[in-house]
Image (tube, grey):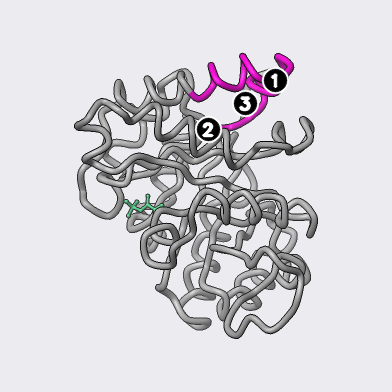
């Protein structure tokens, strides 16, 4: 069975409730009713209620950008998965490189967050990716496969199969520098190879691997044409309805 492409817009720290509602309304108008791709958006926490309400029953998924590993407690400013789910999220981004860089989320924390997402009924989008010095040292695959191994260690097989993995080379995020389709495909192929060797065959067949890093309307089609690239996690270009819709259309083929 072919994997459905999965395009997710990560709005990061952009779009307060009103702007988010406007963007969600535009997406709803352009994207509902047709197309072979699954689509999701990840607004900031305060905009989740407006976006979840606007996109209810549209088939467009809503994702949190992060979650705390604990279900509740004295963790000022943090949001657990259960609250995201109650707000209407079905997915949550975990281990984004900006979380790893600015907030110190290391592989151990990412592992806890993946497990917490499943416990609260959310599907994690696990972000992995190497930094430029690691690529230049020839260590890109070792770093990325290591991040995945740690994040999924001990996870039941059905949960591994339900993951989305987003390969996002850190040097390509928000820089305008995109991995070539060959570089991206080669890493996606290695990720699928890891899944093939460690899990029953259906896991590698069904798990979707997104590419992320300066995906735009102009480069989406050739990236998405690669056999192991099943979608995209889109930052900057998801903030404008026309460019995000163009990327989704590239995924629709
Ligand atoms: C991201 O934040 O996940 C991302 C890929 O950003 P951009 O598309 O802006 O590089």
Indicate which disc, 3 or 1, sits on the residue closer to the N terminus: 3
- Which residue, given by chain and number where applicable, does mark 1 sit on? 199
Label 3 CB-ligand 1 distance < 8 A: no
- Which residue, given by chain and number where applicable, does mark 2 sit on? 209
Residue closest to the eye, 243 or 88: 88
Q: Provide residue 19's location: percent of width, then percent of height.
A: 45, 78
Indicate which disc, 2 or 1, sits on the residue closer to the N terminus: 1
Q: Provide residue 94's location: percent of width, then percent of height.
A: 56, 54
Residues under labels 2 and 1: Cα distance? 16 Å
Magenta stretch, residue numbers: 191-208
Element at label 2: strand
Q: Provide residue 58's location: percent of width, then percent of height.
A: 69, 57
For residue 204, side relative to residue 142 (left or right): right
Indicate which disc, 2 or 3, sits on the residue closer to the N terminus: 3
- Which residue, given by chain and number where applicable, does mark 3 sit on? 3
Give the label, 3 or 1, closer to the camera. Answer: 1
The question of residue 198 being in magenta is answered with yes
């Amino acid at each position: 069975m072919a994997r459905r492409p999965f395009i997710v817009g990560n709005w990061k720290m952009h779009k307060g409730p009103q702007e988010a509602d406007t963007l969600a309304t535009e997406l709803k108008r352009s994207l509902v009713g047709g197309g072979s791709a699954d689509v999701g958006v990840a607004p900031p926490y305060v905009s989740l209620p407006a976006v979840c309400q606007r996109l209810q029953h549209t088939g467009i998924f809503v994702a949190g950008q992060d979650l705390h590993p604990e279900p509740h407690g004295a963790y000022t400013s943090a949001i657990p998965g259960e609250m995201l789910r109650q707000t209407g999220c079905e997915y949550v981004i975990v281990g984004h490189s900006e979380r790893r860089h600015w907030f110190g989320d290391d592989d151990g924390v990412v592992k806890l967050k993946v497990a917490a997402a499943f416990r609260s009924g959310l599907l994690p989008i696990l972000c992995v990716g190497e930094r430029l010095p690691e690529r230049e040292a020839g260590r890109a695959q070792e770093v990325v496969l290591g991040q995945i191994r740690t994040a999924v260690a001990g996870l039941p097989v059905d949960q591994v199969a339900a993951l989305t993995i987003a390969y996002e080379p850190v040097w390509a995020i928000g820089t305008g520098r995109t991995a070539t389709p060959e570089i991206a495909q080669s890493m996606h192929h290695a990720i699928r190879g890891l899944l093939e060797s460690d899990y029953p065959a259906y896991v590698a067949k069904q798990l979707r691997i997104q590419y992320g890093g300066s995906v735009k309307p102009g480069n989406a089609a050739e990236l998405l044409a690669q056999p192991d690239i099943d979608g995209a996690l889109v930052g900057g270009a998801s903030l404008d309805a026309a460019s995000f819709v163009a990327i989704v259309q590239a995924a629709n083929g």
